[in-house]
Amino acid sequence: MIKRLLFFVYLFVSTILVGQQTYYSDVDLTKTGLALKSALATKIINTHTNKLDYTPDIWTASKITDANLTNANQVILFYGWENATDGDATNDLYRDNTLQDTGNGQTFRWNREHVYSKSLANPLLATDDPGPGTDAHNLRPADRTRNSQRNNFKFGEGSGTPSGFSSVTYSGPSGPNTNAWFPGDEWKGDVARIVMYMYLRYGNQCLPTGVGVGNNALTPDDMIDLFLKWNVEDPVSDVEKARNTYHGNTSITTAQGNRNPFIDNPYLATRIWGGDSAQDLWGIYTSSDTEAPTTPTNVVASNQATTSMTLTWTASTDNVGVTGYNVYVNNVLTSQTANTTISVTNLVPNTSYAFTIEAKDLINNKSAKSTVINSSTLQDSQAPTVPANIVASNISGTTFKATWSASTDDTAVTGYDIFVDATFKATTTDLNYTVTGLANSTTYTITVLAKDAANNKSAQSTGVNVTTTDGASNGVTELFISEYVEPDGGSNKAIEIVNLTSASFNLAGYSIKKQSNGGSWVDDLPLNKTDYLVNASTTSILPNEVFVIIHGDNNNATLTSNADLVVPNNSAAPYKFGSPLNFNGNDPVGLFKNGILIDIVGESGNSSKHIEDITLRRKSTISGPKVTYDPNEWDVLAKNTFDGIGSHTATLSLEKIDNTLFRLYPNPVNGATLNIVNPTSTKINELRIFTINGKQVISIQNPSSSVTIKDISSGIYIVKFISNKGTSIKKLIKN
């Protein structure tokens, strides 16, 4: 067997050396999986010797690489399919190559489509410097209108012509049910091979999951099944081959010098990521072994649980060697393994399943599927654990916010029921709930229980008593804008609104608008616009909380995690391109109440770029709105500063403060442990630590007499204790 295998490898390597293109002569094409991926990535990175300018290089190259093969004066339009006979120019396959889009809104023009959308990459694909945003392998001529329709939507499954959006939905620019974009049967293979190239060339900046709707459970990295499927279904076109030949020619000034390996041989994707076999244009893989492994036998199911069980089987044999097994659940491929045992998870309790196993070899020859075996999961009869650490905060005369620690379950916790004075109030999947409609100066008891999908319920938690305030005003009477983020390019834009009053403010009636180029107020966006809210139950802003509005094309984790309202990048009015969150430094932004301006960022009527490439944060001494912009009320921070979003420094100082309750030592602190002195034995519900700019870095529920601070860097911090007797604030120095 060893001699036979060595002989096969010798023949295999010899065949590769004959069949491969010269470009890959220094790449070990006998590798598989991530080793082959790494080798090809090194090759295309090292040979990318000429980084093109977006203008004019890409225009010049596109007219040649994407020329109509029967008319060199025309370019082939990506997403096009019709020969200009139906009266709809947006779906034309060809366009005069002189009709370049100059940015003045002309119809029937063509521009440069980033197949891996600029804003979906992280960081985004900038076009101002030669690099990822100007990579010609990712840029294809497209009708400007159809390019705009695709916008930044992810790709999704469909069929037929690229007539628009597919039936596949995801949580995207238009909310949780955003339709994905289908490029058309004519173009889906091109899309797949471009995405594969961008993933190899730029790594995690261009993850396949970032640009497509699919599953990566069956691949060793971030590649998804969608692009593997498209790579198989849509063969390489002559245009793709011509583009590769052009850009591999190092003597051309507008050529990059590197190639797209998946155009040269789509089967390379199969070698790396698996799945069904794509074209082997070199003929060096699929022709070297045509014998499939034997069918797996003796499949047995054991260790049945509520959502999982174990499968084992007898190993298959092969003339060369078995490399793995495909596991099918109800005839759907769900997992792969190189072993003869696997734990199948994510099943439904008390449900019968049919299992089959399929063996495969290095060349992706597959055996017949094993005989079907049936087995059932156990019934779920165990309740989740009781929720713990119930804490009330943001208490006003009529509301408070309750938070708690997550429960655990043998299957999964699906929600929590909230009770006030033993009466059912609501159900939530979150670990917090805002109780509203209460009376002033009244004590309420809140309890919480956890439940699972089988409706097994835990006992209710220990009751926590919460007394509302007397509703008296703290002198602050209105919401106002607390932060404005305008980055140096891209869509990481945000507006933060703060409530420093002693009462909750209903979002109804509040909105924001922008002054387009300092002109009239446009695009009135209600803060309670349900389909844009991250959580539809967010109907009010509690005392000392903020409300964050962001642009849907943002790619910053801080903005996304703190967002309450996300404005998608729609192509249609009234919020076209994410307006009013698409302000550009010369668009003052206003907060309105019942249509009347109450606060503003930027000088009204000023069309200059006076608030461009900047983050503005309201000073902690400001406690109300103003209808005229006063720069002295704002701290000016560097562009692309996002760390203050989600909290406001003034909220640290507007509660009932008793700084005699607690002390800290040592202070300054040199080590990893901070000790708390609590002379009155007051129960501490929560400890929070903020940077001097108001960014929360630590939050601990029910802290003990010492806390670990090893993960925060040296600097000055604000420590906030929240207890039933009030709030205590201390300054901390970490050396």
Image (cartoon, helix red, strand yellow):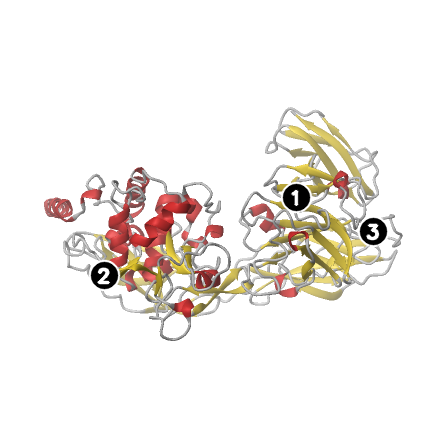
Residue 131 horizontal/vertical position (percent): 41, 42
Q: Nearer the viewer, mark 2 or mark 3?
A: 3
Q: Does 519 sit above or below residue 53?
A: below
Q: Secondary structure at mark 2?
A: loop
Q: Is residue 233 left or right of residue 89?
A: left
Query: Mark 3: which amino acid?
Result: Ser
* Residue that badge 3 annotates: 502
Are circles 1 and 3 on residues that touch, CB within 8 Å?
no
Q: Earlier in the sequence, mark 2 or mark 1?
A: 2
Q: Does 85 sit above or below residue 214?
A: below
* Residue that badge 2 annotates: 366
Query: Mark 2: which amino acid?
Result: Lys
Specify the label residue 611 is tagged with: 1
Measure how far apart labels 2 and 3 are at the Cα level: 68 Å
Q: Nearer the viewer, residue 449 or 657?
A: 657
Q: Local crowd at mark 1 within 10 Å, few (<14), some, or many (≥20)?
A: many
Q: Local crowd at mark 3 within 10 Å, few (<14), some, or many (≥20)?
A: many
Q: Is residue 304 left or right of residue 262?
A: right
Query: Which residue is at 76% across, 48% downward?
Result: 544
Q: Nearer the viewer, mark 1 or mark 3?
A: 1
Residue 511 horizontal/vertical position (percent): 71, 59
Are circles 2 and 3 on residues that touch, CB within 8 Å?
no
Judge whether residue 266 can be spotted in this image: no
Q: Earlier in the sequence, mark 2 or mark 3?
A: 2
